[in-house]
Amino acid sequence: MNFALTEEQQMVKDTAARFADEVLKPQAAHFDQTHEHPNAACRSLGELGFMGIAVPEEYGGAGLDYVSYVLALSEVSRGDASVGVIMSVNNSLYCFPVMTFGSQEQKQSFLQPVASGQCEGCFGLTEAGAGSDPSAMRTTAVPDGDQWVLNGEKKFITNGNVARYAVIAAVTDKAAGYKGISSFIVDLENTKGFSVGRVEDKLGICASGTAEMVFEDARIPKANLLGQPGDGLKQMLTTLDSGRIGIGSQALGIGRAVLEEAVAYAQQREQFGKPISAFQAIQWKLADMACALDASELLLLRAAWMEDNHKHFEKQAAMAKMFASDSAMQAAIEGVQILGGYGYCKEYPMERHMRDAKITQIYEGTNEIMRLVIARNLLKGK
């Protein structure tokens, strides 16, 4: 078993780390406070090849592997978790389904601009009454001549307020239940009847827009159906497996930022005539953080390696996402505790990390759902 990175993977990690330290960290507090979309940073990520890492070069991507994706995304998220989730959604929730299920024509038209980082993509699944249970989906798509007519509202969509393209799930056959859900590629900029609704005012990841997407008799070409009618649920489940590796990597990056800042603070903060890093209580907190984060990284790299090698990775992705997000949240709680009063003040980034970490336990499938996915696979003998 070889734990060493390839030369190419190490280069990706080093490049992402420099970008995080030199570009993202210095401006993260500003974007958190203003809730601005970090457009310049996203365009720079595109130039680095990070907005479509695993997409073949012929479609605008970097043509790298998913191990490189974990390495890059965790470093980017260490710099700014908001930019991390924008990158994650672009790669995992838009590029992945279009690349995996799209036709040659769809890839050429709808994948290249997003994978190259010219614009953002998004994934419209969640609705007000349909989160963990997609069978409650109410958005519909009805055929009309050479078009589909889309009606409904999507909720809590990352990048939904800035995306140019979207993969949207809709019911095409109500009587078929789960098998009546289909997916569509939508050119949001050129679709009449589409509008951005409420943009959420959130606890954390404030520079990442979380929006309501509204479709009112929105007409899209018949050719924009992704795969076959009724393939939507299967496509969504596969897409979310890949997406959970992305969110786990975001969580890992947040945890790494917490640990770095906790170590630095503990070494310079003095009490009773010595740095607080000399006290066992602080050392144990740091040691627990480090162990949990290293374990998270190993789980993520295993899941990514399995995806690269076309193995069934649903359980491994769920494990990685669940453990990494729980570890990041626990690290953030302890990070605030180590900094004491300063950890609770916006003068230091620790409170931002705590706010950012919480969502990783919720989106791309709550951690309660992750435990159900893991158990289901265990009981099936997988």
Image (cartoon, rainbow, N blue to C red):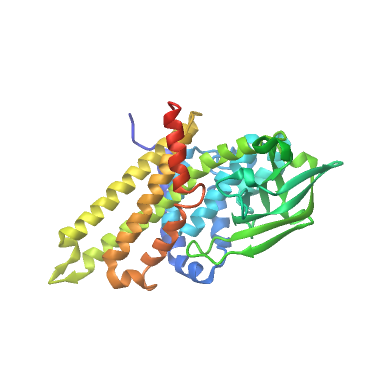
- Residue 330 visible within the image: yes
- Where residue 156 appears, x then y in whole percent? 59, 56
Q: Quadrant of residue 316?
A: top left
* Residue at x 46%, y 33% (from the top left corner): 376
Residue drawn where x is 36% and y is 58% of the image = 257
Q: Between residues 313 and 173, which one lies in front from this camera angle?
A: 173
Furthest residue in direction front, as rendered = 175
List the single residue furthest toward the top: 381
Task: Name which residue lies at 35% across and 59% down.
Answer: 332
* Position in image of residue 275 (x %, y %): 17, 66
Residue situated in front as seen by the camera: 191 or 197: 197
Side of 34 where 14 appears, left or right: left
Name the image quarter holding the C terminus: top left
Q: Look at the image and tell me in which quarter the N terminus lies.
A: top left
* Quarter-of-image position of residue 18: bottom left
* Residue 304 can be seen in this image: no
Where residue 269 sits in the image (x, y, percent)?
A: 22, 69
